[in-house]
Image: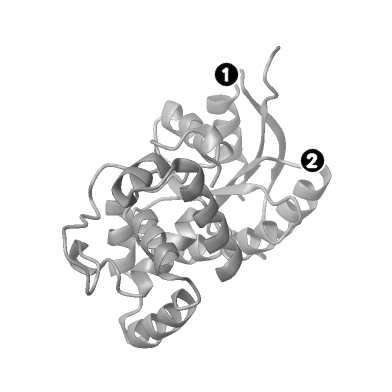
Amino acid sequence: MTATPIRLLLVDDDPLVRAGLALMIGGAGDIEIVGEAADGDEAETVAARTGPDVVLMDLRMPAVDGITATRRLRALPDAPEVVVLTTFHADEQVLHALRAGAAGFVLKDTPPAEIVDAVRRVAAGEPVLSPAVTRQLMRHAAGTAADSRQARARARLARLNEREREVAVAVGRGLANAQIAAELFMSVPTVKTHVSRILAKLDLGNRVQIALLAYDGGYLEDGRREGSPGDARTDAPGDGRGDTPEAGH
């Protein structure tokens, strides 16, 4: 039986960029481009009509920008995954998009095969964001709001029990479900249950948002969880590639 293609929506205000993306991705037999949109407002309309699984979203667009559009799309009942298109790694707008629910980002000059891989990965429930890049983005967050942001993050994380907080920090370190299970001496299904509970308790949309909350709360500063022994390097392998589609969250 042939697998159902991944339904993809392209959103960019430049028609040449959209055409280039369509050309690059069109050769992938497991991805179907179901629509295009020129701004965030149109993206919401087209998404409602076509039901995409994944949206490739430009950040800077007239009228409704990519951040606002991402937030709106992720609030839909059958929310598509969103991958942000950007020009620079260390773009603070990317961080805002991740907080709005994007599952990761790719640079506009990323090789076609890597863009296709990113679409496949987010469709399978995997984030497209390495821990090292997350740390780089966090350094670009507004310093003046750091203290209040940490207080808010810690207050939210306090809703979790101790085991759930351990899983949240492990997710923030970029560990896949199997790696978390091995490190915390639990089964993979139990890890999946904890992740699902974390998402529900904290009203989060994906693993990237769990990771950002752990960073905001100061649990991953200097690669070490505060108040906890042992090394927890944030640039260790485990950017989500280890999660298999059946791993779910």
Residue highlighted by disc 2: 50
129 with respect to 26 (left or right): left
> Residue drawn 54% across and 52% down?
193
- Of 54 and 61, nearer the camera is 54
Q: Residue at x 69, y 52 (%)?
A: 79
Res. 27 mark: 1
The answer to whether residue 73 is above or below residue 127 is below
Question: What type is the residue that disc 2 sits on?
Answer: Thr
Compared to residue 130, the image places residue 228 above or below, namely below
Question: On residue 174, which mark appears?
Answer: none
1 or 2: mark nearer the eye: 2
Q: What amino acid type is highlighted by mark number 1?
A: Gly
Q: Position of residue 95 (x, y in %)?
A: 43, 64
* Residue furthest top in the image: 1
Q: Residue at x 48, y 61 (%)?
A: 209
For this orientation, the residue located farthest to the right is 49
In the drawing, does residue 228 fall left or right of residue 68? Answer: left
